Each structure stands twice: as structure tokens, then as C-alpha cells.
Amino acid sequence: MPKLSGRLLLAFAVTTVAGACLHFLYDLLPNPVTALFSPVNESLWEHGKILFWPYLAAMLALTRRGAPGCRTPWLLTAPLMVCAMLAAGWLYHFTLGGEAMAVDIGIYVVVMALGFLLPQALEGSCERPLLGTLGLLLTLALGAALVLFTFLPPDCPLFLDLSGVNTWSTIPY
């Protein structure tokens, strides 16, 4: 069982609230800078930002005085979190046809919680430089994709704005 220190629980709470606040940032201040960090629409892809950016900030804060390689488990976890949220969102919205905001919030909180637990379980990866490089490259690639697809989203369901009424009936299968 991973160690749940007060510092880790506080970081989880602050990070979760920060991500929730990011959800509304672009609506309050619509511009290209806030678009980089905040969802510009209700697509599954755009909601990866509310996990990714606050989680990276928490990782930097929690590991700033750590041993070399201590960020490896966090860097490996960040892309996994976004993939998990995309998969859960796809399953819920596209496969099951769900539209309840409470389920979306639940998915977000559960995935964020797993993001704080998994690095504790992956502590052994700190000693493996190849995993550290892989984690860094995956995290950088995901960050670049989040930025690029904010302004140039591909034409596929993952990037569709799901805020419209009867959205599910218009998604091609």
C-alpha cells in the first residue's frame, strides 16, 4: 500500500481543485494563453488539460528536493492519467451514451487520485535512467500534443465538442 503522507494528500487536494478551476479559466479569460492550459470546449481531449498541467505543477513541487530520478514515476504516470481519463470518458460517453456531469467529475477525481498513488508504487523506477528518459519524452510529447491540438484539432470524435444538445446522436460510429 502506498504511503499517504499529509503533504501528498494536500497536494492531491490542491491539484484537484486547481484542475477544476482550470476548467473555467478559458470561459473567464478567452485568449490564446489561457487556451493552452484550459479546455476551450467540452471535448474529451481538451479535458486532459485539467489533469495534465496541475499534475505537472504538483510533481515539480513534490519532487523539487528529491534525489536524481525521483521524478521518473511521476513522468511515467502523467501520460497514463490522461490516457485513462480519455479511455474512461470514451467508454462512458461514446460507448454507454452517458451524459451525467457527476460521472465526469467522478472520473476526474478518481484518475487524479490514481495519479498520486501510482508514483508511490513505481518508486523502483527511480533507479532506471531509461525509464526516466521514456517518461520525460512521453510527457513532453503529450504536452506538445495538448498545445498543438488546441489550435489544430484533428477531425475525429475525441476532439468533438460534446456540449451540444443531442450530441450523441450526431457522432459517427
Image (cartoon, helix red, strand yellow):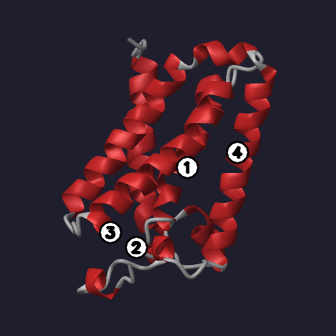
Q: Mark 2 is on which residue type? A: Glu
Label 1 element class = helix
**Circle 2: is it few (<14), some (14-19), or many (20+) Cα within 10 Å?**
some
Query: Which residue position holds label 1?
Result: 52
- Dots 1, 2 in contact, CB < 8 A: no
Q: Nearer the viewer, mark 4 or mark 3?
A: 3
Q: Mark 4 is on which residue type? A: Leu
**Circle 3: is it few (<14), some (14-19), or many (20+) Cα within 10 Å?**
some
Mark with earlier residue (1, 2)? 2
The image quadrant where one finds the N terminus is: top left
Q: Nearer the viewer, mark 4 or mark 2?
A: 4
Which residue is at 48% across, 70% downward? 158
Mark with earlier residue (1, 3)? 1
Q: Mark 3 is on which residue type? A: Phe
Q: CA distance from mark 4 to mark 3?
A: 26 Å
Q: CA distance from mark 4 to mark 1?
A: 12 Å
- Dots 1, 3 in contact, CB < 8 A: no
Figure quadrant of residue 86: bottom left
Q: CA distance from mark 4 to mark 2?
A: 24 Å
Label 2 element class = loop
Mark with earlier residue (4, 1)? 1
Mark with earlier residue (4, 2)? 2
Query: Which residue position holds label 3?
Result: 94
Task: Residue 18: give x, y in percent of width and height.
Answer: 44, 49
In this view of the protein, can residue 10 be seen by the observer? Answer: yes
Task: Residue 19: give x, y in percent of width and height.
Answer: 44, 52
Which residue is at 54% across, 24% downward? 119
- Tag shown at residue 138: 4
